[in-house]
Image: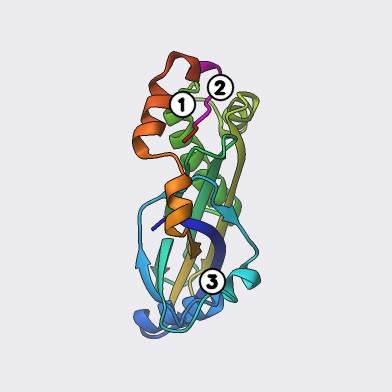
């Protein structure tokens, strides 16, 4: 199965029971009626990000939903928790991208989001052979990644919250949900893993990757 459309969502929930706080976070994210299957973090070639409300129209209650999810929880009053999913998309539509999950304590929403975005972009940059100094700040590396012409877009979806002052469980989540998948014909028209590996290892790939079926 190859995802062709994906939505990003987030939510927070509070309850005396941790499981129920997770359910409430799912409700806040609008995905609680789904049977969620968490997966690892590859964005298929050509997969399009669409608005959440548009994507929800493609889903049905009880449907199995393949999801990249970050979640975190605390029952410590005022403790800051965050969950974030980062995205890095290549400029070549025939190349795959990366999704990253990050969950943390004590980070603001902005900091957690930038960290997740950095993770996804760094994994994609390494795959594409972009040279960079890992010790540089994210802002500097972001400029290098995009200036290379090989990475077209990075973004994140992040939820943070402070632990409930009365000690209720506080759960935060961020999720990327695949809402549509390629037909067999579409899959047949896409480059294979072998094609992509060959393109990445070709000497010309250092000057610009082009994956063709």
The x and y percentages for residue 165 are 50, 77
Region in magenta: 206-211
Q: Name the residue under label 2.
A: 208
**Does residue 210 show up magenta in the picture?**
yes
User: Would you say the magenta stretch is mainly helix, strand or loop?
Assistant: loop
Q: Are marks 2 and 3 in contact (CB under 8 Å)?
A: no
- Of residues 77 and 57, which is closer to you in this image? 57
Name the residue located 56 percent from the left edge and 22 percent from the top edge: 208
Q: Quadrant location of residue 193?
A: top left
Disc number lying in front (2 or 1): 2
- Mark 3 neighbour density, 10 Å: few (under 14) some (14–19) many (20 or more): many
Per the model, the C-alpha gap separating discs 2 and 3 is 38 Å
Residue drawn at x 56%, y 30% as measured from the top left:
137
2 or 3: tag closer to the N-terminus: 3
Q: Where is residue 159 in the image (x, y as percent from the top left)?
A: 55, 63
- Residue that label 3 marks: 11
91 over 170 or under it: above or below: above
Residue 84, horizontal then vertical, whole percent: 50, 56
User: Which mark sits nearer the N-terminus, 2 or 1?
Assistant: 1
The reply to whether the magenta stretch includes residue 154 is no
Label 1 sits on residue: 134
**Mark 1 crowdedness (10 Å alpha carbons): few <14, some 14-19, many ≥20:** few
């Amino acid at each position: 199965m190859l995802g062709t459309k994906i939505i990003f969502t987030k939510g927070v929930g509070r309850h005396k029971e941790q499981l129920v706080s997770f359910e409430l976070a799912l409700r806040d994210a609008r995905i609680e009626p789904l049977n969620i299957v968490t997966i690892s973090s590859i964005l298929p070639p050509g997969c399009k990000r669409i608005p959440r409300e548009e994507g929800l129209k493609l889903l049905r209650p009880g449907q199995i939903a393949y999801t990249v999810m970050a979640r975190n929880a605390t029952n410590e009053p005022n403790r800051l928790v965050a969950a974030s999913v980062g995205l890095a998309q290549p400029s070549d539509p025939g190349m795959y991208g990366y999704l990253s999950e990050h969950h943390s304590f004590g980070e603001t929403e902005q900091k957690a989001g930038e960290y997740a975005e950095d993770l996804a972009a760094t994994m994609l940059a390494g795959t594409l052979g972009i040279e960079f100094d890992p010790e540089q700040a994210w802002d500097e590396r972001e400029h290098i990644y995009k200036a290379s012409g090989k990475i077209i877009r990075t973004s994140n979806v992040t939820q943070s919250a402070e632990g409930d002052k009365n000690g209720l469980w506080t759960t935060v989540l961020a999720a990327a949900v695949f809402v549509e998948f390629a037909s067999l014909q579409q899959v047949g028209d896409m480059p294979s893993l072998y094609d992509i590996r060959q393109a990445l290892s070709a000497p010309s790939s250092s000057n610009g990757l082009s994956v063709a079926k």
